[in-house]
Image (cartoon, rainbow, N blue to C red):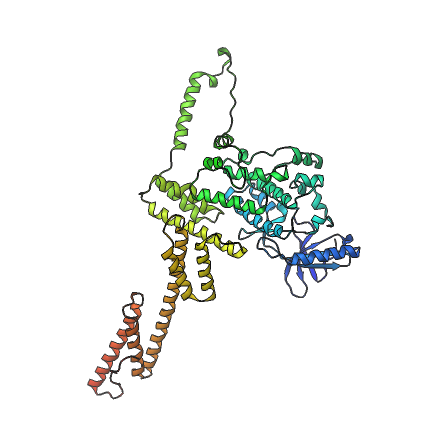
């Protein structure tokens, strides 16, 4: 493509890894956008043009924080184009090229955001059907933005570019896509999401064949390897979740993005309750089926060793003789004891502190689960126990707040009366009715028991109430500062009676309020100075000095 302009847009540069998509500038509004341009043959018939414009109308109505916005589209001659928001960040494929694989905590957060976007689409009977790392953007704030939603993919009227049927794209196809028998398009998206999750965790897609026929055969018949065989710190529940997303039989996969989100929420609850990996595997991950029990999960994570045959004594080298093996075993046991020796309270605390100070995604959860909770279990009355409890309270409070705000933003139903009260109080505060908001927060503190389940919400209410009271204090302080300045100005102008009235009013109204005592003392001091100046003036016979007023403040 050689032209430098499409419609009203000036093409600047081709965006990496995004097919025929360009960074472009609107000629009149000077707004930067991402412009996806389709083949010249696209607009050759009225039917194709109408199909495309219907698709544009649908895309313009999709508004979700994890979907790239589409502003519409049009034709320039026989070229068709779609106009999208320009996302600042990098694609998941570029991130994986740079980092190899991602921490499982980051993968869980990315999965959650992508699942929320797919849930939004599936509720409207829309499906992506072409998910791959190139169409998964990560912004500078670590937010997910899915690209290239095309409703026409399901009807088969989409004019797909070469990238849509490339070998790289097929690595994320579901088995039914290869056979052309898609009965549940939503489960195609689930399978692709499983492939991407596998790659984020291990650094490679589940199948790496280099020929389309062999790749199709692998997706249809070859079971993918377990994530836990490659990533030893991957939780068993996450390994089981990815495996079920990659089921060959569509009916055995995770049933929907909503089911996936429920599974992630349940896993977070297990983690928050201090459930171990083995216990979680043994209980299963509802609504999923975690394969095997805790013994199988442990065996999955334990590397297997093979016994080597014993040679005859005359052929046995030194490193295989009994004395050498015993000595080596002693050394290994010593190393194992040192490595397995539980970390001290100081070490647990410092590691948690480092994580909480880092910007790494999931760092707070790792600090809680790996260091703070073990610290309190082993050293409940230790030197750092109180600080650890404060950090745990903040982490739990932040997590509860993030979940509730996400529900409110996405319009999801609230689970209980506690969430309803908190949401109502936030609405009052956002509206500017701080008195009603404070009343709601105080009611929450009176009603909610101070137990483990409700403690994060009590802490939220206390924090919000303190913020409201601090704002009210700041407003009163600013008001008194301004009134003291008015009194000084009046005194300088010789209007002592009016200045005295202000000082006496401040003393009368705010004396006894500890947070305002400094300003009250300033009023007292000003009144004393005024009285002293008046007395000195009277002794000198200075008629220009007005005698102190004796009337009461208004």
Q: Nearer the viewer, residue 540 or 200?
A: 200
- Which x, y percent locates residue 496? 29, 82
Q: Quadrant of residue 48?
A: bottom right
- Asked whether the viewer can see residue 11, the reply is no
Residue 177, placed above or below residue 546? above
Residue 252 in picture, x, y percent from top left? 60, 38
Tag count: 0
Q: Quadrant of the C terminus?
A: bottom left
The furthest residue to the right = 45
- Taking depth in this image into account, of 198 and 278 the one nearest to the observer is 278
Q: Nearer the viewer, residue 225 or 179?
A: 179
Q: Is residue 421 above or below residue 385?
A: below
User: In this image, 386 relative to 258: left or right?
Assistant: left
Please say whether residue 407 is visible from this viewpoint: yes
Q: Is residue 318 above or below residue 472?
A: above
Percent position of residue 47, x then y: 78, 55
Q: Is residue 518 left or right of residue 34?
A: left
- Rendering coords of residue 520 (x, y %): 29, 71
């Amino acid at each position: 493509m050689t032209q430098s302009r499409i419609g009203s847009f000036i093409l600047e540069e081709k965006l990496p890894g995004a097919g025929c998509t360009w960074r472009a500038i609107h000629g009149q509004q000077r707004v930067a956008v991402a412009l996806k341009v389709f083949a010249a043959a696209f607009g050759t018939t009225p039917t194709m043009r109408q199909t495309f414009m219907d698709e544009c109308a649908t895309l313009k109505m999709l508004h979700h924080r994890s979907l790239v916005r589409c502003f519409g589209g049009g034709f320039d001659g026989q070229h068709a184009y779609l106009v999208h928001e320009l996302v600042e960040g990098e694609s998941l494929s570029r991130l994986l090229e740079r980092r190899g694989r991602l921490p499982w905590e980051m993968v869980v957060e990315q999965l959650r955001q992508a699942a929320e976007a797919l849930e939004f689409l599936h509720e409207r009977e829309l499906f992506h059907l072409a998910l791959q790392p190139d169409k998964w953007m990560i912004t500078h704030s670590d937010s997910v933005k899915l690209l290239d939603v095309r409703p026409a993919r399901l009807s088969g009227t989409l004019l797909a570019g070469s990238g849509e049927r490339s070998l790289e794209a097929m690595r994320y196809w579901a088995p039914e896509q290869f056979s052309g028998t898609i009965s549940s398009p939503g489960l195609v998206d689930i399978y692709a999401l499983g492939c991407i999750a596998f790659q984020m965790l291990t650094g490679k897609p589940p199948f790496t064949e280099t020929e389309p026929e062999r790749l199709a055969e692998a997706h249809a018949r070859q079971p993918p390897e377990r994530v836990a065989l490659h990533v030893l710190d991957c939780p068993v529940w996450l390994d089981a979740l990815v495996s079920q997303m990659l089921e060959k039989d569509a009916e055995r996969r995770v049933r929907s993005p909503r089911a996936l989100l429920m599974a992630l929420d349940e896993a977070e609850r297990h983690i928050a309750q201090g459930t171990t990996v083995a216990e979680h595997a043994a209980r299963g991950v509802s609504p999923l089926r975690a394969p095997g029990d805790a013994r199988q999960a442990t065996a999955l994570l334990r590397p297997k060793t093979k016994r080597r045959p014993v040679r005859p004594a005359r052929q046995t080298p030194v490193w295989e003789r009994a004395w050498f093996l015993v000595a080596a075993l002693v050394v290994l046991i010593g190393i194992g004891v040192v490595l397995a020796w539980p970390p001290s309270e100081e070490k647990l605390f410092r590691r948690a502190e480092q994580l909480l100070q880092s910007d790494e995604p999931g760092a707070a959860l790792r600090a809680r689960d790996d260091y703070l909770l073990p610290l309190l279990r082993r050293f409940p009355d230790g030197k750092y126990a109180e600080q650890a409890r404060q950090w745990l309270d903040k982490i739990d409070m932040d997590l509860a707040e993030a979940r509730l705000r996400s529900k409110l933003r996405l319009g999801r139903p609230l689970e209980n009366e506690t969430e309803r009260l908190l949401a109502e109080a936030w609405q009052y505060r956002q509206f500017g009715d701080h008195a009603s908001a404070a009343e709601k927060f105080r009611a929450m503190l009176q009603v909610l028991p101070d137990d483990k389940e409700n403690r994060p919400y009590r802490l939220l209410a206390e924090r919000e109430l303190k913020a409201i009271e601090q704002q009210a204090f700041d407003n009163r302080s600013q008001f008194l500062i301004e009134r003291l300045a008015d009194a000084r100005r009046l005194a300088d102008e010789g209007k002592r009676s009016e200045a005295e009235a202000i000082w006496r009013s401040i003393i009368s109204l705010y004396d006894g309020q500890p947070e305002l005592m400094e300003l009250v003392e300033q009023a007292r001091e000003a009144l004393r100075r005024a009285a002293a100046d008046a007395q000195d003036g009277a002794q000198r016979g200075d008629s220009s000095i007005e005698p102190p007023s004796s009337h009461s403040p208004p």
